[in-house]
Image (cartoon, coloured by chain):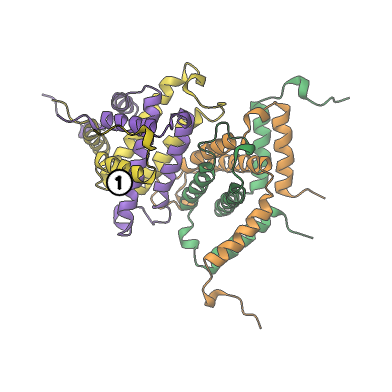
Chain colours: A yellow, B purple, C green, D orange
């Protein structure tokens, strides 16, 4: 019976920040700024690649990139927590909005009967 | 019996991109660039706030911010998928590394016995 | 007898902010955040291009991109001003550091006698 | 008889990239991505500051920040060069547009006769 991943990370980041008395620094603004820094560290791995397909990455970059992806997720979970946003519900709502904004071509829609 | 939130979003973003034939654009590099754009749209809401606490936000910004958080998560899930990274596992590993890099002060550690 | 371009823009951005009483918002932190937002608006024009060469841009994007480049420069000039950094001198120093870090191959160096 | 600062940097960045055969990497897209990375390295210095005023910076950060400002300018000059944008002219045009979008309050306008 494991906790949902996003809820699990919310609990863990709360405990981590609390144990270090870091809540004082964790305004949504500061967390958004930290998030943008982590995203740039992720982007840096791709900036000079010709097309940016995964195969162009050097061997050693995989683990570094994995850690940057984790950093991005951890800050994202913390901002959402401060703003009392349920990330999963928000993402489901956004997918619905995107489906209206960018309708799939009819040919690719599944048959319905 | 619901799917874990991050796995659920991975399935949904795959289906969404596939139905629109968007995989051709979704190199990790392009997705990282799109992610950085969404993070900036999130940051824009905070840029002129005095300290950036949640209470300084205007009423109408809450829903816009919720949508930006969703966009960030959706691109993050897609990059991780292209690079075959399990986001939850990566985040758990990163929390462990962070705990070594930034040890909690002894006073705040739970008693163990 | 025209003023140097960077000094000219420093004067103009000072006058612009002063006339609107905007100095109160223009901490280096807030300006850095605004700068990152403008850079993302620039990057957005390139995010789905196959290689990102200039020829892949649509006709109408040229003027929009020109305005984003201007926004980036205007915020950069303002941050440098707040921190009392001479941008031209800083850039010349950085080029010297970069030349040490990344020496040009001998074949490409100009003959010296 | 010195060259204008932005034109001077354009000449120097051209020579620097050419001597290292780096033009092949310097598409506008890649340069925009590199620019966003440098801006994040600048922002990183401010992310946890309470208000972000210059006085909150630690002593040693000044030189690091000066170098980041230089990096941002150098990439900006190179993108503009690739896209044949005159940065100074673009910035002057943008200031005019901004003045229309955000008119100064009458009380702060200079008297005209």
Total count of labels: 1
Q: Is residue B111 above or below residue B43?
A: above
- Decide which of B104, D69 is in the foreground and name it: D69
Q: Residue at the location (79% across, 49% down)?
A: D2
- Decide which of D52, C1 is in the foreground and name it: C1
Q: Which residue is mark 1?
A: A24
**In-image side of B48 versus A74 (left or right):** right
| Residue furthest to the top | A59
Q: Residue at the location (47% across, 22% down)?
A: A54
| Residue furthest to the left | B113
Q: Position of residue C5 (x, y in %)?
A: 70, 54
Using a 10 Å C-alpha cutoff, classify the residue at mark 1 as few (fewer than 14 neighbours), some (14 to 19) or many (20 or more): few
| Pointer 1 chain | A
Q: Is residue D38 above or below residue B50?
A: above
* Residue D60 appears anywhere in the view: no
| Residue furthest to the bottom | D113
**In-image side of A65 versus C81 (left or right):** left
- Decide which of C79, A92 is in the foreground and name it: A92
Secondary element at tag 1: helix
* Residue A29 appears anywhere in the view: yes
**In-image side of B62 versus D59 (left or right):** left
Q: Is residue A69 above or below residue B46?
A: above
Image quadrant in which you'd find residue D26: top right
Q: Position of residue B72 (x, y in %)?
A: 37, 39
Q: Position of residue B10 (x, y in %)?
A: 31, 29
Image quadrant in which you'd find residue D69: top right
């Amino acid at each position: 019976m494991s906790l949902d991943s996003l809820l699990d990370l919310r609990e863990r980041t709360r405990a981590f920040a609390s144990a270090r008395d870091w809540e004082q620094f964790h305004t949504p603004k500061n967390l958004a700024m930290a998030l943008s820094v982590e995203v740039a560290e992720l982007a840096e791995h791709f900036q000079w690649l010709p097309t940016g397909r995964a195969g162009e990455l050097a061997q050693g970059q995989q683990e570094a990139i994995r850690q940057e992806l984790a950093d991005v997720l951890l800050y994202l979970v913390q901002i959402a927590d401060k703003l009392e946003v349920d990330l999963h519900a928000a993402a489901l709502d956004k997918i619905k909005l995107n489906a209206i904004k960018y309708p799939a071509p009819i040919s690719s829609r599944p048959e319905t009967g």
